[in-house]
Amino acid sequence: MAGQGLFEFADIPEWERAAREDIQVAEVVFSLPLEQSYTYRIPDEFRDRLQPGVRVRVPLGRGSRSVVGYCVDVRQSRNPNRRLKPVQEILDPAPLLSETMLQLTRWIGVRYLCSWGQVLESVVPAGVRRRAGTRLIQGFALTDDADGRLAELKLPPRQQAVVDVLRGCQEPLPAAEICERAGCGPGPINGLRRKGLLRVERVRSELQGQLSEPVDREPDLEMNPRQRDCLNEICRAMESGQHQTFLLHGVTGSGKTEVYIRAIREAVRYGRQAIVLVPEISLTPQTIRRFRSRFRSVAVLHSHMSDAERHWQWQQIASGEIEVVVGARSAVFAPTPRPGLIVIDEEHEPSFKQDSTPRYHAREVARERCRMEGIPLVLGSATPTLESWHRARQQQDVLLSMPERVSGLPLPPVVVVDIRNDPYIGRGLSIGRALQQAIHRALDEGGQVILFLNLRGYAPTVWCRQCGTGVKCPDCDLTLTWHRDRQQALCHGCDYTISAPRQCPECGCPNIRYFGTGTQKLEEQVRDLFPQAPVLRMDSDSMRRPGSHDEALERFRSGKIRILLGTQMIAKGLDFPNVTLVGVVDADSMLQQPDMRAAERTFQLISQVAGRTGRSRKGGRVIVQTTCPDDASIVHAARHDYVGFAGHELRERHDLQAPPYSHVTRVVFRGPHEQAVAETARETAQRLRQAAAADSRIRILGAAPAPIARLRSRFRYHLQISAPDVESVRKIWLEVAADLQMPDHVELAVDVDPVSSR
Ligand code: ADP
Ligand code: ZN
């Protein structure tokens, strides 16, 4: 660089000198709630080295604190503002995201009302940013000329041991491994390095296991006519190069997964990659095995990976080596270079919505990504969300139906049992007469039983007889749940734990009672009632250990366990032919949630749980215990009538102008001082009402205390904006948010299209 100035005017042609008077500038965004991007000068030393998608260090704000941001654009500026601050450092050797992914993240920021930088920070895994597993570890190997020289050298025994270890290796080894194998410390390695016998290379510190473990390949199945029709439609869309979203509505066991697999096979044939999103709890070894037995290279992305593993997977995917990426929500950002298809299985699962900033829904992000790429999106479910069903009915998306099981077996009969006058329930048991009899019969006939209860712990309420109140968490507006196995009362909002309260913390009265039934109490009752039958409980408390889930299912599959009981965890995907009875212990607990989607969720859960039986010639049946036997969600679920349920529920939503007939954005205010939170929320609601006054289609609800009015010591208030289209909501919110004065200690969270209203 130093000598360059000497030649400048002599050697550089006129036109190029003029061009050099332009400077390069970079647009940079930050992982902060800042709307706009900032422009920086690219100093000559970085000229032509900075690309969009790379992180940079730049000065920001008054004190010119140096911060890390994402470069999102690089351009020439003819009349640059001479006072532009310079880019100080380039942090990544290559872009972390492709141009398409940059555009996608920008779209997310706009759609979900957060900053582009916040989206980028969340989309690029921490392990990828840090290049986890690539930098830290040095590996050692013998130099090429080592053999010749070693013949002439007499090495000390420990150095010789190291040489012996390395002779047997193809790959460079990390020091720790050499030491272990040679039974020495680092000294001999350093000794050999000084003699010039070792070369140093970088090696990854960790390798991921799942890819390398071999799986038997299985051939494709002969598709039935229904499957073939669905597949043909998807393939036709793929060939057209136009985006199309398909809603594949198929009952459990109708062969949806086979359709995904065959559609992916087509994508792969065209040299493209596919992404399959499944709910985190369906990302079981069985699911992964199913894909790995059918494709050459499958990458798995899930939340329990180490940073190094994730980075390794990310690189493999970006290289185009991977045919199929299977993962939970965030796999929608998998950096496949040429995606050919995205599939979302169980698209109705609420876990596809992220519950921290950016609060995106993977289905909507996938839709946009597929639109940008001109490829199909396939949404599969036995019980689609009303949003997706509505779109399909409006012919915005294409509906594909598979109403029958592959096996030709009917869906199991569902019996709804009204437990209002049941003698056993009256005595405090959670299994009523009809369900008890059915369990006895199923066991007598050699079948297995699944009991579903969506509440973990022993008893959901710890109650004081004297003052008649539930014992609450000191930090949350939630009553504690009694976990008898640990002898502790637990807050499910914040994990606050106390040992068994012997007396009421309010009035000191010793008359503490436990009310309601969680899975632990159910387990106890089941063991009492059916002492001969081995029982297994599956919930997030009993399945803490990695691998315990798979192990438990294996014990059930083998028949050692006769009764499996648990929460949502057992509602999904299990396929056991010997299950002849499924009991839904308490349908009301889902139905009575203070949530617009309570009926929809109840219908979905009953349908899903029911799908766990009747999978073989042995048949099977379902018993649903409820005190609301006439509720539409229960009546329709008992008839396996999704279309009827959707029609009913859509009419109700239409009357209320609720989603899918409107878009809702929820704003939650929280902070340690109730008054400040309440005032800010009310003031904001007031301003929103003023701003929306001209447009009668926009409605503002609240502000009011949120259903959980306090969580982790912070008071919570919320308000809702709703309008027929998402753009109106955004416009109103941005208008008001622009000059919103937030007091210290009040935070705000904006949730576009919320799936929870807690
Ligand atoms: P879904 O995803 O709709 O629940 P699956 O694709 O898992 O359904 O199929 C259910 C069962 O039927 C699986 O055991 C699968 O192997 C089998 N199956 C699917 N399609 C076929 C087919 N065309 N021929 C034979 N068996 C099939
Ligand atoms: Zn709490």
Image: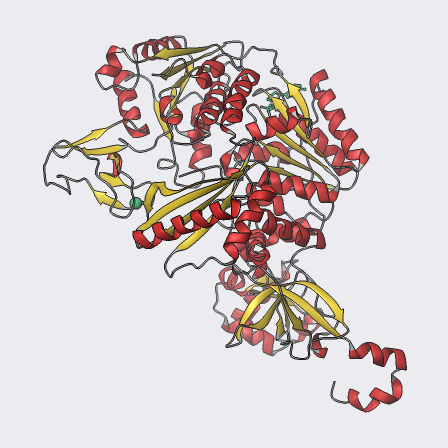
User: Going by the picture, which residue comes out furthest to the front?
Assistant: 694
Residue 364: quarter of image:
top right
The quadrant in which residue 38 appears is bottom right
Q: From the image, which quarter does the C terminus lie in?
A: top left
Closer to the camera, 105 or 617? 105
Q: Closer to the camera, 695 or 748? A: 695
Q: Is residue 483 left or right of residue 1?
A: left
Comparing 289 with 13, the one in front is 13
535 in relation to 734, above or below: above
Res. 212 visible in picture: no
Residue 578 x/y as whole percent: 47, 16
Residue 326 placement: quadrant: top right
Q: Is residue 12 something that shows in the picture?
A: yes
State which quarter of the image contains the N terminus.
bottom right
Count of all numbered marks drawn on residues in the image: 0
Left or right: 19 as drawn, with respect to 650? right
Residue at horizontal 67%, vertical 72%?
A: 151
Residue 74 rendering spot, x and y as whole percentages:
72, 66
Is 110 situated above or below 614?
below
Residue drawn at x 68%, y 45% as measured from the top left: 322
**Furthest residue toward left:** 509
Residue 202 picture location, percent across and down: 62, 65
Task: Tell me which colouring the rendered structure shows.
Answer: secondary structure
Quick check: 725 left or right of 681? right
Residue furthest bottom in the image? 6
Q: Residue at x 56, y 64 (%)?
A: 137
Q: Is residue 306 left or right of residue 595?
A: right
